[in-house]
Image (tube, rainbow, N blue to C red):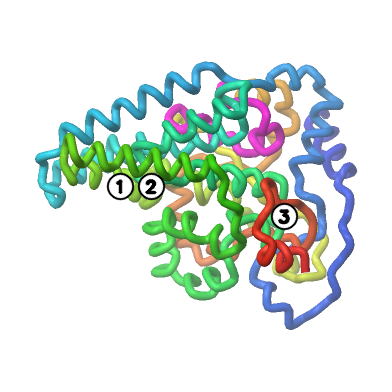
Amino acid sequence: MARSAATTATKEAKPQADALPADSDNKHNDFFWTYTEEPHRTRRLAIIKAHPEVLKLCGPEPLTKYVVAGVVGLQVVLAYLLRSTPFWSWQFWAVAYVFGATANQNLFLAIHEISHNLAFRNPLANRLIAIVANLPIGIPYSASFRPYHLTHHKSLGVDGLDTDLPTALEAFVLDSIFGKAFFCTFQIFFYAIRPMAVYRIPMTWVHLLNVVTQITFDFLLVHFASPNALLYLLLSSFLAGSLHPLAGHFIAEHYVYETVTPTQRNPDNKVPVPETFSYYGPLNILTYNVGLHNEHHDFPAIPWTRLHAVYEIAKEFYEPLPRHESWIYAIWRFIWDENVGISCRVKRKNGGRIVGGAVKWKQSEVEA
């Protein structure tokens, strides 16, 4: 009875946005276009109304900085130990896949957590710890990740703003089993390059500090260890975003796996399609509970250690939602299931906003 009431309340709270003109030749028909508001704000308000105590879970998690320090230290030690191990040896790749990729995926998600100011109360302290977490990744990205990721939250599914969305070109070129396998293998490069192709954010002193600190760290690692030590970190980052169990979260979070009707690809469709999916399995232990993705999007100010509490408090809202039982299976099905692919994402034409601003020439294009 409570579950039914929660579902009904959520649906009733969804305001409809203005519809786009009908166009049977719309070139975006391959995506799931919707005219509903993104679901997380609506559900957040409903949960707060039903369970106001959930707001007590907001605030930084002191444990995060210690986990970051431990994982960064582990990766530096492993890089040093592998300084004389041949790059093309099975030992090098085995350590990079089992330990390095797991550690660097953990650091990717530490930066994700820190981008919401959830390691410290002081914003500057969060920027600095993110730069530290970035060190074993080998390439500076923490400063630029934050505005793009916060825009993803504020503009979920908005075409031209949410850089987590695949572009129409990606959907066209990679629309095959081979293409999807290629995407899953090299998805770290898609996530690195795509944001800059959609719109650019302005350079700040934090970006500069991120770059200088990373280059200095890489230079010192090569100088005091060897080039192989740096190659280990870079390979770890690549494998962390490739065919690795933890990389399944990239696909599982927002790609639509639920069975939908053909009309839900029609630009006139106004029926909400599920667009965020949670995973409650054991791999969350290694990934800052990023699997609880509905809970995270509903309450981005609640840290990873308290997301399970969100689920327990508002269980009647979350139990009915579709979920993933396995990230490995999510990757497998994404590649082999002809009904799941690059274009299985919910898109919106309007709404949202850019966090942190964008360069003027690109901003005008977005607003046009």
The disc at residue 145 is none
Q: Is residue 46 magenta?
A: no
In the image: residue 368, left or right of residue 324: right
N-terminal of the pair, mark 3 or mark 1, is: 1
Between 364 and 187, which is closer to the camera in this rendering?
364
In the image: residue 275, left or right of residue 70: right
Residue 275 rendering spot, x and y as whole percentages: 67, 51
Q: Quadrant of the C terminus?
A: bottom right
Residue 130 rendering spot, x and y as whole percentages: 49, 33
Quadrant of res 55 = top right
**Residue neighbourhood size for the residue with mark 3, other residues' Cα within 10 Å, grouped as few (<14), some (14–19), many (≥20):** many
Q: Which residue is mark 3?
A: 273
Q: Is residue 332 above or below residue 132?
A: below
Between 98 and 365, which is closer to the camera in this rendering?
365
Q: Is residue 26 above or below residue 150?
A: below
Badges 1 and 2: C-beta atoms under 8 Å apart? Answer: yes
Q: Give the label, 3 or 1, closer to the camera.
A: 1
Amino acid bearing label 2: Ile
Which SS class for mark 2?
A: loop
Q: Quadrant of the N terminus?
A: top right
Q: Is residue 73 above or below residue 24?
A: above
Badges 2 and 3: C-beta atoms under 8 Å apart? Answer: no
Q: Which residue is mark 2?
A: 139
**Residue neighbourhood size for the residue with mark 1, other residues' Cα within 10 Å, grouped as few (<14), some (14–19), many (≥20):** many
Which span of residues is magenta-colored? 283-307
Work out how far the residue at label 2 is from the one at label 3, CA to CA, in angstroms: 36 Å
Work out how far the residue at label 1 is from the one at label 2, CA to CA, in angstroms: 8 Å
Q: Which residue is mark 1?
A: 234
